[in-house]
Amino acid sequence: MTQPFRFGVNLSSASRTTWVEKCRKAEELGYDVIGVPDHIGLPAPFPALMLAAEVTERVRVGTYVLNAPFFNSGLLARDVATLDQFTDGRVELGLGAGYVQGEFDAIGMRFPSAGERVDMLAETVATLRRHFADPGYRPRPARPSGPPLLIAGWGDRVLRLAAEHADIVAFVGASTSNDGTLRLAGATETAQRVRYVRGLLGDRADTVEFNLLIQRLVAPGESAGVSAELRGYISPDATDELDQVPTLLTGTPAQMADSLRERRERYGFNYFTVLESNLEKFAPLIELLR
């Protein structure tokens, strides 16, 4: 079953005034979800999302994504339920395993191994599901089972966890090193990751959304410069063609819109998230795809 398009944008701000302006602008431009990243040095996600919901009317608000190892899962359940209740059920909860060692170092926290971080993510998911399924749990989230759960990843274990538990599987479209450096995947690798998840979903296949984070929009005339800039950060299976990288969009707005239609048809991605730098540049595509 083909899912309808949805569009999100990740935002951040250092002041209340600019944050309010950005959130209202995102809603005005037609975005469905305002996302907040979870990185040391940026505003804390939950206060930012509460304010975002307070100054908008329609748009959903979500973490994109929380570093699960940073949080005590029991206390996180309380914060998520409270935010969901106070926003009248407009929350999408995005979780990931964390990947930047420098951020753990900055807060004096031991950087767990990759396997340990995935274990922590799995424990967080289990705790949230258990609490929200309990009718006696307080505070209650707005929805009986809690807000929709998005799990982001690329490796087998995280994607397997997402296939089992998530309402939204977020394909990050890249592998990462401990310093946060991305290696953008090409079409072949992306198709393999999607097939892997589809093989695990079973009877949930028609209800789970597939999300993809779009890293860059490359307008006509920018391709040569962006290709040079990204050389070394793109998987070898993508050759030298930017349009072979699903997390990049190239061409005119109409051509980019056609690319998103093709990616929905080919991979099943219906929910696309862009970075703040593309807030306004991506907006014409929303109008074309509605």
Image (spheres, rainbow, N blue to C red):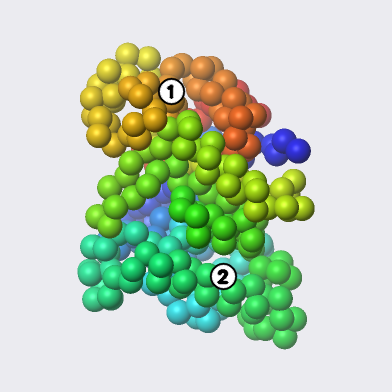
Residue type at numbered disc 2: Val
Label 2, residues with CA under 10 Å away: few <14, some 14-19, many ≥20: many
The answer, for residue 220, to whether it is visible in the render is: yes
Depth check, front residue: 89 or 112: 112
Q: Position of residue 190 (x, y in %)?
A: 49, 38
Disc 2 element: helix
174 is higher (above) or lower (below) than 82: above
In x, y percent, where is residue 142? 69, 68
Question: Which quadrant is the N terminus positioned in?
Answer: top right
Query: From where the camera sits, is residue 257 visible?
Result: no
Query: Would residue 280 appear left or right of 139 to someone viewing this image?
Result: left
Q: What number is the disc on residue 36?
A: none
Q: Distance of mark 2 from mark 1, alpha carbons?
A: 35 Å
Specify which label sits upstream in the sequence, 2 or 1.
2
Task: Find residue 151 and report its horizontal and vertical position in percent.
Answer: 54, 57
Quick one: 76 or 286, which is closer to the camera? 76
* Quadrant of the image occupied by residue 251: top left
Three-letter amino acid code at the position of disc 1: Asp
The residue tagged 1 is 243
Local secondary structure at mark 1:
helix
Q: Is residue 16 above or below residue 247?
A: below
Disc assigned to residue 125 = 2
- Residue placed furthest toward the bottom: 136
Q: Residues within 10 Å of mark 1 (few under 14, many from 20)?
A: some
Q: Are marks 2 and 1 in contact (CB under 8 Å)?
A: no
Picture layout, residue 142 above or below residue 20: below
Q: Nearer the viewer, residue 234 or 7?
A: 234
